[in-house]
Amino acid sequence: MSEYGLVVIGGGEAGISAALRGPARGQGLHDQPRAELGGGCVQTGTLPSKTLSNAAHFLESLKNGKRYGVPVVPGQGRYKTILDSRHKTTMCEVGVLATLIRKKPSTP
């Protein structure tokens, strides 16, 4: 049985920080492979909600384009495409975090 100086359970900001800094401080690391990288901020919080908010603001700006001398043919946003964009943004950030974790320094 191995001993670890650090066990990382979550994949949020604190978990990723610990996973990256622990081995550099000489602590053996055991991370849970099933942890969702990014935690609440990336998976369900700030990042997805900002993506949806930006889409809504963009559609609202298009509606008011005529006021600024930029007539735009009225249209509708495609909700599925907006959700796909949100998912793609989230997966991109998860990919960045996964790369950071893969490149973490090895345990001394």
Image: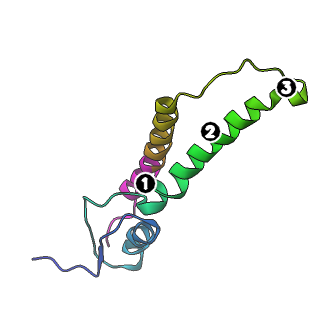
At mark 1, the secondary structure is helix
Name the residue that disc number 2 marks. Answer: 55
Residue found at x 18% / y 80%: 3
Amino acid under label 3? Lys
Q: Label 2 near label 3: C-beta < 8 Å?
A: no
Mark in the foreground, 1 or 2: 2
> Which residue bears the numbered disc 3?
66
Q: Dot 1 corresponds to which residue?
A: 43
Q: Is residue 26 above or below residue 60?
A: below
Classify mark 1: residues with Cα within 10 Å, few (<14), some (14-19) or many (20+).
Answer: many
> Could you tell me which secondary element the residue under label 3 belongs to?
helix
Quadrant position of residue 35 = bottom left
Mark 3 or 2, closer to the camera: 3
Residue in the picture at 9% in, 77% down: 1
Q: Taking 98 as reference, is 107 above or below it?
A: below
Measured from the top left, where is residue 52 in percent x and y? Answer: 57, 44
Q: Position of residue 46 (x, y in %)?
A: 54, 57
Residue segment shown in magenta: 94-108
Report x, y in % for residue 21.
43, 72
